[in-house]
Each structure stands twice: as structure tokens, then as C-alpha cells.
Amino acid sequence: MSTTYGVTEPRTNTVPTRRVSGLLKALWGAVQERRKRNKLRTALYDLSDRELKDIGTTRGEIDYVASNRDINPRGIPSAEWVRYLPTVDGQIHPY
């Protein structure tokens, strides 16, 4: 009597590599976005009330502007001014 056992292949990881790498990319993107928001928030808080008025915002709108960089708090279509705020090192250029 002869019994033949089938050869089984080793199991691969149950979580596909693509899913993990996609998750890591999304997480890294979220971290980078948060850094940009914090950098912008800091730059805005460093401006005087006069400078904030010149760019069309107030101190009360800083958190909103930092969180919604593509949306103007007053509903005016262009929020281009956000791109030209001083950076942490004092340089003024688009982000």
C-alpha cells in the first residue's frame, strides 16, 4: 500500500504588500499635510494684525485658513495669497 501526499506550497503573507505600502503612503501624505498646516498657522500667527488685514484675514480666521488652504474664508474664488505668506525662515515664495 502506497500513500502519496500532496506537496503544499508555503503560505504567503495574508496582507498584500500593495495594501501595506498604500497605507504607508497615505499616512506619510497625512503627516506632510499636517506639517504644512502647522507651518502656515505659525507663519500667520507671527504676522501683525495690520499684515493680516493686508492679506484679507483676521486672527480669528487663522485656524480656518490653515486647515482649508484652498478655500477663501470669505468665499472669494481665489485664495492665491496663502501661497505667498512668509515661511518660517522669513522667505516669501510659493509653497
Image (cartoon, rainbow, N blue to C red):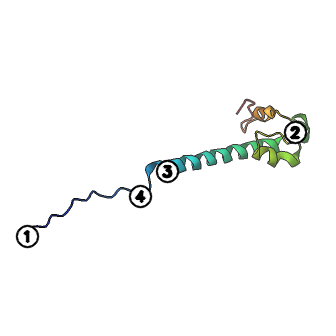
Q: Quadrant of the N terminus?
A: bottom left
Q: What's the mark number on residue 19?
A: 3
> In screen coordinates, is 10 left or right of 18?
left
State which mark lies toward you, 1 or 3.
1
Q: Amino acid at mark 2?
A: Leu
Dot 3 and dot 4 residues touching (CB under 8 Å):
no
Determine which residue is flagged by label 2. 52
Q: Quadrant of the C terminus?
A: top right
| Distance between mark 4 and mark 1 Cα atoms | 38 Å
Identified at 33% across, 58% down, the residue is 11
Q: Residues within 10 Å of mark 1 (few under 14, many from 20)?
A: few
Pick whichever, 57 or 42, lies toward us: 57
Dot 2 and dot 3 residues touching (CB under 8 Å):
no
What percent of the width, then of the height, locates residue 37?
72, 45
| Distance between mark 4 and mark 2 Cα atoms | 53 Å
Q: Secondary structure at mark 3?
A: helix
State which mark lies toward you, 1 or 2.
1
Q: Earlier in the sequence, mark 3 or mark 4?
A: 4
Pick whichever, 48 or 5, lies toward us: 5
Determine which residue is flagged by label 1. 1
Pick whichever, 71 or 6, lies toward us: 6
Determine which residue is flagged by label 4. 14
Identified at 72% across, 47% down, the residue is 38
Dot 1 and dot 2 residues touching (CB under 8 Å):
no
Q: Amino acid at mark 1?
A: Met
In the picture as drawn, the residue positioned furthest to the bottom comes out as 1
Q: Residues within 10 Å of mark 2 (few under 14, many from 20)?
A: some
What percent of the width, then of the height, locates residue 39?
72, 43
What percent of the width, then of the height, locates residue 16?
44, 52
Q: Earlier in the sequence, mark 4 or mark 2?
A: 4
Above-or-below relation of 13 to 33: below
